[in-house]
Amino acid sequence: MYEPHRVGLPPIGSYVRELWRRREFAFELSRTSLRAQHFDTVVGQVWLLHNPLLLSCVYFVLVDIIRQSTGGIVFFAHLMAALFAYHFVTDALRQAVKSVTGGGRLILNTAFPRILLPASSVLVAVRKFLPTVLVFIPVAFIAEIPFGAHLLWVLPIVALLLVLAAGLSMIVAAAQVYFRDLKTFLTYGLRVWLYASPILYYASEVPDRYQILLVVNPLAPLLTAWSDVIDRGLSPDPADLAFGAAWAFALFVAGALFFMSREREFAVRL
Amino acid sequence: MTYRTSLERAPTLKSTLMRLGRRQRVIREIEALKGVSFSVQHGKVLGVVGANGAGKSTLMRTVAGILPPSSGRVEVNGRVSTLLSLGVGFNRRLTGRENVVLGGLAAGLTRAELREKYDEIVEFAELEDFMDMPMRTYSSGMYGRLAFAVAVTMHPDILLIDEALSVGDARFRRKSFERMRELCGEDRTILLVSHALASIEKLCDDAIWLHKGRMQMWDEPAAVIEAYTEFLGITDEDHEPDPVTMEDV
């Protein structure tokens, strides 16, 4: 039964049910995207890892020069861990922004919940994130990062990063249909986001006049918690977790509502 | 069924900002379908004819649930498989195998069902050697054969076919026509959009004629085709549709 949607949203119950029923499609699409990026070969994986690794080194040298002092290997570990977390979210966004517009004919010709498209982008980002954890472990050893039960906090933080990534992915995927140059602006925006997040520095070092950056940045509380757990060996500040969760869920809900209310137009806009 | 579409070549943020200053509107409302009302009984074949731009593809997409109606209701009982505009959503950069798997999963098949059907599809399309090659290397006939094979193998309750019958070499066309006849003979509901009027006449139980979004006629195929060809002015001296139009050549 297809009825016009007065309120703008499809009936959520059946939508989610259809979504769950076709989840294999999202998995398969992510696998196909990764295969297209040669992720299934050893060389491909090494290639994908070398970018954040190289970037970590470059940024480390940059900060070292600018600050005239070095935080040493511990700072390098912080930089690397935060950069990997940042790349997790931004990889999802970069993939998601072209997921709907790139899926042209599939959208025009098959009836399926379109949210599967940004969902598969998030899955691709997860798949790319996991090997970076392995690369980080030797660095962690060298930096003598404290190892203990507090590391279990990594799991909820990753989950929140995932929710945040999903929400933003849905927003950019849908927005790209209406503004085809969003992809260009996104590249620029993500770069600014990198500098505005506590990756190249510690959140505690931010002077008062720039504290506003940490407040309006949805990634900042999660990255602060991430740093606390990984390189300081502390349990995260509950305020950071709460704030980060609030941002993540708010963006997720906003993204989902935006995408679902607009997805029926995609077939005629592509 | 009305939808809004943009007249710009590629809508961008930059162009939107520029337009805001000049107060231009580039959104056009298109009334694709107006007052179209019909029903198809289970197991019957309905043909849809009409000039280009009449709204046939939009009608198919509405029935398939791809475009929701802006007013009225579409009631569909059973699983729908679509063969819309010869593509079923194939991505040319992927291999045939990947496309079939993705298409099947998007259509809601489980992996087990897909595994069963995969061999059937490849055999019908006669593309065993090519399934692992990217589809951009396929000829248009191979592409169409795979699309047709995918759609008819899904064993849907309702099959929507949009101008996809005339693909492939003569042997494949014979095979697909036979398959169509089989499907029409079985207890399946089929909606067939075609410009090949002979197929409509031979295969359909009922036919409707769409013109500029309105339904002009809903009747037996022969009557509809006669009226349609008269309207188009392509009948010969005896006011019979000529063989070229009927694609009987």
Image (cartoon, coloured by chain):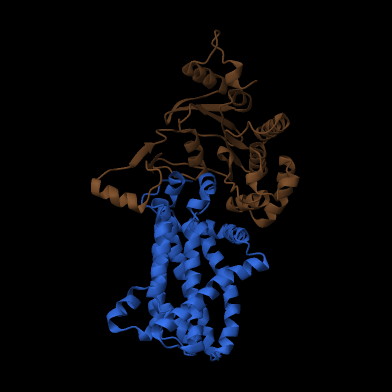
Chain colours: A blue, B brown
**Would you say A22 lies left or right of A218 here?**
right
Quick check: A199 above or below A167? Answer: below
Would residue B213 be seen by someone viewing this image from the given angle?
yes
Residue pictured at 51% horizontal, 81% vertical: A154
Q: Quarter of the image containing the N terminus of chain B?
A: top left
**Percent of width and height locating residue B215:** 44, 28
Residue pictured at 43% horizontal, 57% vertical: A183
How many callouts does the rendering have? 0
**Percent of width and height locating residue A11:** 44, 55
Q: Quarter of the image containing the C terminus of chain B?
A: top right
Quick check: B135 above or below A162? Answer: above
**Percent of width and height locating residue A166:** 47, 66
Quick check: A169 above or below B206? Answer: below
Quick check: B220 above or below B75? Answer: above
**Percent of width and height locating residue A153:** 50, 83
Which one is in front, A57 or A150? A57
Would residue A158 be seen by someone viewing this image from the given angle?
no
Which one is in front, B46 or A269? A269
Q: Quadrant of residue A62?
A: bottom left
Which one is in front, A22 or A41? A41
Residue pictured at 39% horizontal, 60% vertical: A185
**Would you say B178 lies left or right of B22 here?**
right
**Would you say B38 lies left or right of B129 here?**
left
Farthest top residue in view: B237
